[in-house]
Every structure is written in structure tokens, then in C-alpha cells.
Amino acid sequence: MGAVKSKRMPRAVREQQMLDAAVRTFGQRGYMAASMDEIAELAGVSKPLVYLYLNSKEDLFTACIRREAKALTVAVRAGVDPALPADRQLWDGLRAFFTHTARHPDAWSVLHLQARTHGEPFAAEVASMREEIVAFVTGLIVVAARAAHRDPDLAEREVAGLAEALVGAAESLAAWANVTPGVSARQAAATLMNFAWAGLGNLMDGQPWSPPEPVHEAIG
Amino acid sequence: MGAVKSKRMPRAVREQQMLDAAVRTFGQRGYMAASMDEIAELAGVSKPLVYLYLNSKEDLFTACIRREAKALTVAVRAGVDPALPADRQLWDGLRAFFTHTARHPDAWSVLHLQARTHGEPFAAEVASMREEIVAFVTGLIVVAARAAHRDPDLAEREVAGLAEALVGAAESLAAWANVTPGVSARQAAATLMNFAWAGLGNLMDGQPWSPPEPVHEAIG
């Protein structure tokens, strides 16, 4: 139960500190087990101030999900150049995704493990982030199919299913990589490209995917 | 709030009816929103009897997860003949998996969406089911790699990552198929084989996967 440290700290800054503490606590303890006392102490503020700023435990959790979902989608989009070929975009996007989830394991735990329970108000925040990522992957598959002149052969529903499979595989791998010592973001991305792109590519033109030359890479 | 219908019904039978009602209610409403009143009414028993038999809402939810996790793993194992080649085992296992999740959407919702929150006692039940399925898939990949004489080239960690990716893709596709009208279990399994096996196969010997002839198929 730390006291308020500085009355002159702007509200926005202090709110981010509360969210940092909340993401760590929710990510490590789970939503039910996390206590507002612990979050306030970790943030170095009083518990009433947390309630004043963020209203309730549920609203605080929702704010965490909203912030972390946005951070993840921004990181993935920033890693991708839409002018490049689809497989290169996917490779860059996967590395950005796994780099972000490895650097922010508590945030990923909040998004992946804590927030899927349906019927809860915060579930909609995660669902909307996931839809955005599925839409992005769907777009890549459509572009790749078009480039391979196989557009009429790849039905819309088939593309939707492939995008769901790829996103589910990435989610699962990120959770696994975060609890498996020594698995780098690059290795996780390479595993998924080997697994997925060769399969997708075969659907389109029978060519297995090959990784780009290391000299061109921006993300480690 | 129905009354006890028959005093002569064996306890085991009545308990299964309570679990049927609980799986449906938890699956459709979510754990938090589901009420014991609703579950008792749907089961046609009194609420005190539900508490007498299953102790608490948390214990009832745990019993649901345990029963449904076992049913799913039994269904997948029953669909697979260990004497067949690895790709055929995977294809049969995937069809058994998607057939089961399509027939029991509330059970799949309980397992996939409701029970992943970590820090909760019931999370361990789902984690243990998932580990069993990942171990099964890992075994198939190892067998396939051995058959292709590529064992030394496929590191243990790479195999583990591929199995995690495949299981995550299957989980994601099952949830999608259950909310997308007109997607059959067979289509979902075929999408995942197209996506995954060609990629895995390329890792091993560069051959894309081809579906078996329909005449040999046991699961629809």
C-alpha cells in the first residue's frame, strides 16, 4: 500500500503506471486471483487512487486488454511493408508478432489466457483484436492467391479457414515459446513459416516457401 | 427449480444429467454468468441436490471439464489406427476431433473458451488434456520424420514447436467451424491437412500431402 509519490505527476502518466502494474499482476496471477492491493502497491499508489482513475477491477482489466491489444496490432502492422510479396509480409509479421509477445509475456498472458472467457465484457476487446489480425492474414492469403493466379480456385470460406488456422497456430506457438527456455522469436516465426507457408504455397502453386536472405531482415 | 423426479434413479445417472445441463449452461453463458438455479432446472432436479452431489459451482465446472476432456481425447484416439502411416493417422485424428467438437459445441466452448484462465483450479484439467493431444501429435511427427529418414535433421524442439502450432491451429479452426454455418468436420479437417501436412511433409521429404481415396474412409 504505497502512498501517492508525487502530486505533480500528470494523470496520464500515473494511469499508464497503474496499467503496467495491472498487466503484470493479471498476467502472472490470473484475473480472479489478482488483488487490487497488490496492483496499487506495485504501481506505488494508493488503492483508492486506482479506483478513482480506473473505477473497478473489471474496468481496469478491460483497460489493460484494450491497451495491450492495440500495442500488439500496432507492432505487427509496423513490422510489415504492404509493398512486399505476401510471403515476405507474413514472415515479417510473424517475427514482429513473436518478438512482441516474447518481450511482453505478461501482456500476452492477459490477452491469450485471461481474456477468452466469453460472456464477460472484456472478451469483446480481445475478439476485436483477433478479428483484425485474422483479417490481415486473410488479406495476405488472398493477395498470394491472386499473385499465383489461383484466385478462382481458392474459395472465400477456404481462405477464412486457413487464416483462422494460421492465427491459432501463432497464438499457440507464442504461449509455448514464452514458457520454453531458449526459443527465440525468430525461431518461432521460422517454425510457423515452415509449417504454414509451404502448405499454403502448395495450395496455390506447388512451390515450398524459402526464407529471405538474412541481409534484408529488419527484425531479429 | 424442478423437483426430484424419481427417487429410484441411480445416483450415477442423475449426476450425468446434472453434468449435461451444466455443460450446456456453462458453454452458452460462460462460467461467471451461469447460475446454479438454471443448471438445476435444466437437469430437472432441485438446487440442493446439485450441491449435495457436486459440492460447489467450481467443483461442478471442474467435473464438466474432466468429463468433456476425457470424451474428446477418447474420441480422437478411437478415430486413429496406430498401424497406419502418420499422415493417415493425422487425417483420421483431425476428422475425429472436428466431428466431436461439431457434435458437442457446448463442451468445446467449455474446454476452449472457458477453461484457459490460469491460476484457477480447473485450468489444470484442460492443460493436462492438451498435453496429451500435443504428445500424440508430436509422436506422429516423429514417426513421419523417421519414415522419411530425416530424424537427425528434425530437432526435438522443432518437433515440439510444430506440434504446438498444429494443435493451436486445430483449436482455432474448431471454434471457427462451430460458429460458421455450413462448414463440415470433414472440410475443417481437409483445410488443416492442406495447410499443415504439406508444410510438415515439405520439412521431411518435399512431398505435398494428398488425401486418401474416399472409399477407405471411416469418419465422415
Image (spheres, coloured by chain):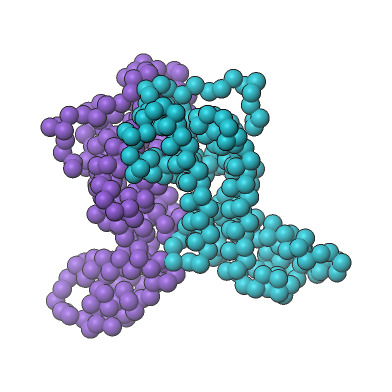
Chain colours: A cyan, B purple
Relative horizontal placement of residue B121, taking residue A93 as reference (left or right): left
Q: Residue at x 45, y 31 (%)?
A: A144
Numbered circles on residues, count = 0
Q: Could you say where residue B3 lies in the image, as x and y percent from the top left?
A: 23, 83
Give the quarter of the image for residue A177: top right
Position above or below: B19 against A139 = below
Q: Could you say where residue B115 lies in the image, as x and y percent from the top left?
A: 42, 58
**Is residue B120 something that shows in the picture?**
no
Q: Residue at x 41, y 35 (%)?
A: B163
Q: Which part of the image, by quadrant, shows the N terminus of chain B?
A: bottom left
Relative horizontal placement of residue A99, taking residue B143 as reference (left or right): right
Q: Nearer the viewer, residue A65 or A36?
A: A65
Q: Could you say where residue A5 lies in the image, as x and y percent from the top left?
A: 84, 66
Q: Which part of the image, by quadrant, shows the C terminus of chain B?
A: top left
**Is residue B209 something that shows in the picture?**
yes
Q: Could you say where residue A71 lies in the image, as x and y percent from the top left?
A: 63, 50
Q: Residue at x 28, y 69 (%)?
A: B21
Q: Nearer the viewer, residue A138 or B36?
A: A138
Residue extending furthest top?
B149
Q: Residue at x 65, y 20 (%)?
A: A215
Give the quarter of the image for residue A146: top left
Position above or below: B204 against A56 = above
